[in-house]
Image: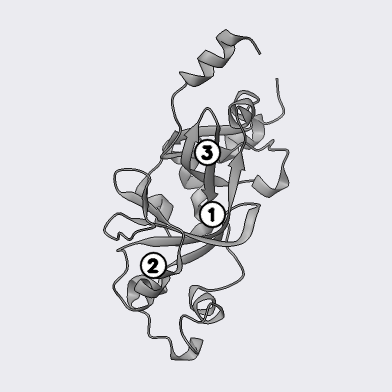
Amino acid sequence: MTRDDHSADRNAPSLEGHFLIAMPGMQDERFARSVVYICAHSPNGAMGFIINKAQPVSFGALLTQLDIVQDENDIRLPEKGREVSVCMGGPVERGRGFVLHSSDYDSESTVPVAEHISLTPTLDILKAISEGIGPRTAIMALGYAGWGAGQLEEEIAANGWLTCEAEDSLIFDTELDNKYNRALGLLGVDPTFLASEAGHA
């Protein structure tokens, strides 16, 4: 890569606060039919969370496993706590939890991502949600998706991903199975047409 190519990369717009939507021809099965919310993107790489693939564990069961509550049967979560989805956030550090949430909650470890979206990677937010004093809306991810310098740009150039500005309501929607088609809808793309065109020159 020439120096001019590097400078072009550095001037490329950041995809922070955007969705990546996997194309039907996605080679990596871990990302097939994935919608990824990008939290950080710079010339050094990118990081985000898959928001439409469920973990086989409920939020209440997770609170029990983490000893935040003693017994799942005794959990009396407020409504906003019961609606927290637990997603497979990505293949990196799959045992580590992250909470994407509305910006009405803040702690020492909270990082603003977009105007109305923040990220908190510590247990304090789970305790707050279980006590009814957490954010208005939240989604939990176990693990994350990460790309090295230039890697995501190469995947987009190879037609691995579509991109669009994120819609907050879609991030927190509890109907995970519908998120892929809804994300395509943000671009005006019909999923059936996209599938039929995949693989054609």
Alpha-carbon span between mark 1 and mark 3: 12 Å
Name the spot of residue 86 as percent of width and height, x first. Answer: 52, 65
Going by the image, does 28 lie left or right of 3? right
Say if 183 sits above or below 201 in the image. Answer: below
Question: Which residue is drawn at the image coordinates 59% and 46% (left, top)?
Answer: 145
Task: Identify the mark nearer the N-term, 3 or 2.
Answer: 3
> Which residue was labeled with disc 3?
20
Name the spot of residue 141 as percent of width and height, x first. Answer: 52, 59
Task: Identify the mark nearer the N-term, 1 or 2.
Answer: 1
Going by the image, does 23 lie left or right of 64? right
> Which residue was labeled with disc 1?
52
Question: Which residue is drawn at the image coordinates 64% and 37% (left, top)?
Answer: 195
Give the structural element (helix, strand or loop) at label 2.
helix
The residue lying toward the viewer, choosing from 113 and 172, is: 113
> Which residue was labeled with disc 2?
125
Name the spot of residue 36 as percent of width and height, x first. Answer: 53, 45
Image disc number at residue 190? none
Question: Which residue is drawn at the image coordinates 44% and 24% (left, top)?
Answer: 13
Dot 2 surroundings within 10 Å: few (below 14), some, or many (20 or more)? Answer: many
Task: Please name the amino acid that badge 1 sits on.
Answer: Asn
Which callout, 3 or 2, points to the residue nearer the camera? 2
Q: Picture quarter containing residue 166? A: top left
The residue lying toward the viewer, choosing from 122 and 186, is: 122
Name the spot of residue 30 as percent of width and height, x first. Answer: 69, 49
In which quadrant will I find the C terminus? top right
Going by the image, does 140 lie left or right of 112? right
Question: Which residue is drawn at the image coordinates 68% and 38% (left, top)?
Answer: 26
